[in-house]
Image (cartoon, coloured by chain):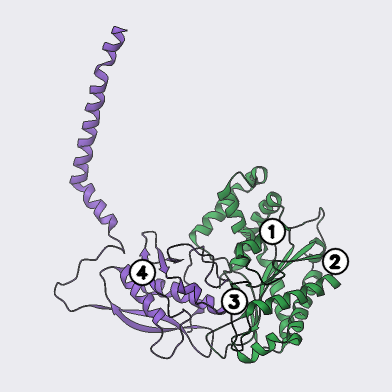
């Protein structure tokens, strides 16, 4: 879709402003050697919940239940084997707005964000697993915002105060993900490779999309679509304990590889 | 005191005089040409075009709609005739209504068929605002792949068929909504994305 590289370069400027001003991602004083060393907290986001059931399967399985089951398994894996705290955006069947989900990540100073979903389509044949990271929906408005931020980034560092300028804060939160597109794409690629290796589903690859949940998160962020609940065969898989464990394991492996990457 | 009052007295008259001159000048400018300029500026997609020939049979406009195929993830084109004019915005409303109605060639629509088009407005800045009824979100129970298809079927249909449209904003029941079904960010204007369209 859109070229993320140019945006990443611009985003680097924004990163300075964001990190200094909002202190959203936990960064230590010295330059860390590996991605993992700078992360203290990761957020796992079980897609949908409560009244908002997400996609529905022919056999009555709901996306919201499957995403929660996989998320809980992934949380357990990470907590057992990795040295950081895991926060879930929901740990039971409740409604959480998209905005609140990213707010949870930002307030907890998450260093990584993984949203877990099951896909659904009108085509019965649609099947497979894919991993998304953000594509900024490049509009004139976006360009203007970026220009504004570039021109004012030094001034921003000294004058940001959460209560002072609501519009400015909105712009910053809105653009939070810009600085992390490259890391997000690396994480997406590694997770997708592991999903492909472990699940035996069709590999739909990594994709970029203007997803609300990813846009507001101020750290590397991906959205995993484990399989299609609208496909009867894949619905059965998604509902099975065995497959859910495999999805969690695949994400965990991709994550582990990402954390070992040099920064 | 008395002196002061006398010195001030002519002032209101002077102000009135200046004001009436300014008014007169403005009125002259308005009728001498400014008026026409103003009218021209307001001729855009929302104002009826003058009919080409009076008494001509009802004209139609060919629009290209975007649907899904059973075998891939791409959007596929399908052309359709809609009643032409009087405004591009009304033609756009008809095009989106046809998109929701679905394919005539066995393709699939990613939009819930119960959805109604409340209004399409095309701004002079090239932003088309599509206001859809609540069903578009309430009856939407697919995943992110379908949500992307639904959004870009609308965005591409408008941008592809109407030159005045550069960007598209989607509203639900007249208000901004976060997403249709929990994924695609509707709070920003969309540019068309033809990379999602089959060759």
**Residue B100 falls in which quadrant of the image?**
bottom left
**Residue B185 visible in this rendered orientation of the protein:** yes
Disc 2 target residue: A83
- Residue B79, position as x, y percentages in the image: 36, 83
Within 10 Å of the Cα at label 2, are there few (<14), some (14-19), or many (20+) other Cα atoms? Answer: few
* Image marks 4 and 2: residues in contact by CB distance under 8 Å: no
- For chain A, the rendered hue is green
Q: Judge by depth and name the residue closer to the eye, A207 or B142.
A: B142
- Residue A97, position as x, y percentages in the image: 61, 65
- For chain B, the rendered hue is purple
Disc 3 target residue: A54
Q: Which mark is residue B163?
A: 4
- Residue B166, position as x, y percentages in the image: 42, 66
- Residue A129, position as x, y percentages in the image: 66, 83
Q: CA distance from mark 2 to mark 1?
A: 20 Å
Q: Nearer the viewer, mark 4 or mark 2?
A: 2
**Residue B162 falls in which quadrant of the image?**
bottom left
**Residue A5 visible in this rendered orientation of the protein:** no
Disc 1 target residue: A106
Q: CA distance from mark 4 to mark 1?
A: 41 Å
* Image marks 2 and 3: residues in contact by CB distance under 8 Å: no
Please tell me whether residue A30 is drawn above or below residue B162 in the rendered image.
Answer: above
The numbered mark 2 sits on a residue in which chain? A
Q: Residue furthest left?
A: B55
């Amino acid at each position: 879709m859109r070229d993320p590289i140019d945006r990443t370069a611009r985003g680097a400027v924004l990163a300075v402003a964001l990190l200094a001003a909002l202190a959203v991602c936990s960064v230590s004083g010295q330059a860390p050697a590996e991605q993992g060393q700078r992360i203290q907290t990761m957020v796992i986001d079980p897609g949908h919940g409560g009244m908002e059931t997400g996609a529905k399967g022919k056999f009555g399985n709901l996306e919201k239940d499957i995403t929660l089951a996989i998320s809980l398994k992934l949380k357990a894996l990470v907590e057992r084997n990795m040295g950081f705290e895991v926060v879930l955006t929901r740990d039971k069947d409740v409604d959480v707005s998209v905005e609140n989900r990213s707010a949870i990540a930002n307030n907890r100073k998450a260093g990584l964000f993984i949203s877990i979903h099951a896909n659904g389509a009108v085509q019965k044949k649609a099947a497979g697993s894919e991993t998304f990271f953000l594509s900024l929906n490049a509009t004139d408005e976006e360009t203007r915002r970026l220009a504004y931020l570039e021109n004012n980034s030094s001034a921003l560092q000294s004058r940001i105060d959460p209560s002072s300028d609501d519009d400015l804060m909105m712009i910053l939160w809105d653009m939070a993900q810009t600085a992390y597109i490259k890391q997000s794409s690396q994480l997406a690629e590694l997770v997708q490779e592991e999903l492909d290796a472990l699940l035996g589903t069709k590999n739909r690859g990594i994709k970029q999309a203007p997803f609300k949940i990813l846009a507001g998160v101020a750290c590397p962020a991906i959205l995993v679509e484990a399989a299609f609940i609208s496909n009867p065969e894949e619905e059965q898989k998604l509902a099975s304990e065995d497959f859910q464990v495999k999805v969690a394991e695949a994400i965990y492996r991709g994550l582990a590889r990402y954390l070992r990457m040099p920064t | 005191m008395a002196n002061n009052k006398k010195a001030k007295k002519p002032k209101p008259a002077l102000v009135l005089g200046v004001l009436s001159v300014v008014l007169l000048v403005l009125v002259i400018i308005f009728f001498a040409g400014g008026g026409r300029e103003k009218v021209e500026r307001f001729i855009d997609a929302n104002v009826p075009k003058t009919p080409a020939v009076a008494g001509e049979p009802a004209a139609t406009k060919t629009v290209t709609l975007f649907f899904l195929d059973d075998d891939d993830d791409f959007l596929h084109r399908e052309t359709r005739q809609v009643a032409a004019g009087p405004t591009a915005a009304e033609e756009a409303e008809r095009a989106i209504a046809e998109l929701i109605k679905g394919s005539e060639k066995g393709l699939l629509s990613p939009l819930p068929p119960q959805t109604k088009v409340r209004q399409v407005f095309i701004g002079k800045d090239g932003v088309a605002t599509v206001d859809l009824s609540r069903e578009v979100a309430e009856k939407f129970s697919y995943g992110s792949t379908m949500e992307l298809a639904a959004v870009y079927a609308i965005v591409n249909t408008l941008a592809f068929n109407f030159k005045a449209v550069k960007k598209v904003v989607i509203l639900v029941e007249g208000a901004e909504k976060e997403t249709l079904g929990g994924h695609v960010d509707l709070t920003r204007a969309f540019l068309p994305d033809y990379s999602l369209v089959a060759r």
